[in-house]
């Protein structure tokens, strides 16, 4: 009984130290910087669909545990996209539009492959369901930009580089120092953005897979908290980092895409 109490006390101390750790990420800069927006760009003509963050929970107990991610409809990350487009919910629809059924099926299939059934609700503002069929809501837009942030609907510890080996080894090495020696931390993001014309013809795709690295220790000055020092969205048990950190990780991709999209428009005038 004494040994069990001692083990629980040590576990409590370790968890307390781990919870008190700060994270510092080495955020990446975009490969292409957004310099200016052409005067010809009309934000109301470009509809932004998706771009919601994820919330990850650890489910199961004992040795059988996994991480399940669900779309967080309360958190949307648009970054520089707000300079060229408008969330689709803010663009009024006027009746229904006749577009090829194959285009609708292609869009919904490709999006569901990324998000699973959990993400189909993201496309609700695009369509109206009649007699079991999806029909595009009519809007005066030229382009639909449909975005999805990783991770996928169901993830596990392989979401970390090399099956998390580096993080596990540095954590074990850090324990005897009471987490004074930094723990290496990885965050993997897998982001997709697809562009469609007003008839839902697919135009081009931008995708980015990357690891964002960081360190954790009690003495580290954190850069994963917002200006008020809030650690909103963090969940240590599920390896969920703060909403501020995820925003900082995704924003360079959004800026790179915005530059690519403007270049594409210049090369493919209507």
Image (cartoon, helix red, strand yellow):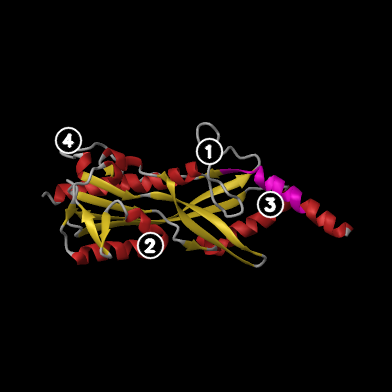
Q: Please tell me which of labels 3 and 4 falls first in the chain.
A: 4
**Residue at 64% from the left image edge and 59% from the top image edge:** 169
181 versus 38 height, above or below: below
Tell me, yes or no, whether the two marked residues, 2 and 4, touch with CB atoms within 8 Å. no
Q: Residue 115 occupies which quadrant of the picture?
A: bottom left
Q: Is residue 181 magenta?
A: no
Q: What residue range appears in magenta?
A: 11-23
Residue at image mark 3: 174
The tag on residue 216 is none
Query: Whole-Å distance between the Cαs marked 3 and 4?
Result: 54 Å
Query: Whole-Å distance between the Cαs marked 3 and 1?
Result: 23 Å
Tell me, yes or no, whether the two marked residues, 2 and 1, touch with CB atoms within 8 Å. no
In this rendering, does residue 160 appear at all? no
Where residue 222 sits: x, y (%)? 56, 39
Tell me, yes or no, whether the two marked residues, 3 and 4, touch with CB atoms within 8 Å. no
Q: Nearer the viewer, mark 2 or mark 1?
A: 2
Q: Nearer the viewer, mark 3 or mark 1?
A: 1
In this rendering, does residue 62 appear at all? yes
Residue at image mark 4: 39
116 versus 220 height, above or below: below
The tag on residue 225 is 1
Q: Nearer the viewer, mark 3 or mark 4?
A: 4
Q: Residues within 10 Å of mark 3 (few under 14, many from 20)?
A: some
Q: Nearer the viewer, mark 2 or mark 4?
A: 2
Q: Please tell me which of labels 2 and 1 falls first in the chain.
A: 2
* Residue 138 in the figure: left or right of residue 25: left
Q: Nearer the viewer, residue 58 or 160?
A: 58
Query: Whole-Å distance between the Cαs marked 2 and 4?
Result: 34 Å
The tag on residue 114 is 2
């Amino acid at each position: 009984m004494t040994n069990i109490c001692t083990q629980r006390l040590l576990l409590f101390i370790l968890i307390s130290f781990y919870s008190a750790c700060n994270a510092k990420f080495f955020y990446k800069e975009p490969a292409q910087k957004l310099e200016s927006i052409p005067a010809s760009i009309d934000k109301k003509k470009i509809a932004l669909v998706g771009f919601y963050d994820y919330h990850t929970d650890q489910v199961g107990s004992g040795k059988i545990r996994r991480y399940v991610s669900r779309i967080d409809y309360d958190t949307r990350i648009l970054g520089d996209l707000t300079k060229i487009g408008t969330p689709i919910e803010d663009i009024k629809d006027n009746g229904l539009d006749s577009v090829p059924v194959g285009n609708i099926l292609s869009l919904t299939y490709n999006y569901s492959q990324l998000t699973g059934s959990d993400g189909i609700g993201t496309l609700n503002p695009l369509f109206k369901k009649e007699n079991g069929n999806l029909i595009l809501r009519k809007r005066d837009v030229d382009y639909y930009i449909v975005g999805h942030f990783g991770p996928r609907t169901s993830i596990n510890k392989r979401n970390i580089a090399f099956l998390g080996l580096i993080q596990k080894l540095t954590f074990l090495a850090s324990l005897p120092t009471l987490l004074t020696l930094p723990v290496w931390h990885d965050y993997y993001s897998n982001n997709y953005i697809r562009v469609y014309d007003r008839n839902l013809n697919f135009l081009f795709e931008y995708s980015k897979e990357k690891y964002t690295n960081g360190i954790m220790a009690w003495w580290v000055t954190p850069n994963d908290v917002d200006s008020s020092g809030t650690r909103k969205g963090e969940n240590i048990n599920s390896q969920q980092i703060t909403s501020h950190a995820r925003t900082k990780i995704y924003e360079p991709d959004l800026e790179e895409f915005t530059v690519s999209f403007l270049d594409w428009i210049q090369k493919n005038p209507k």
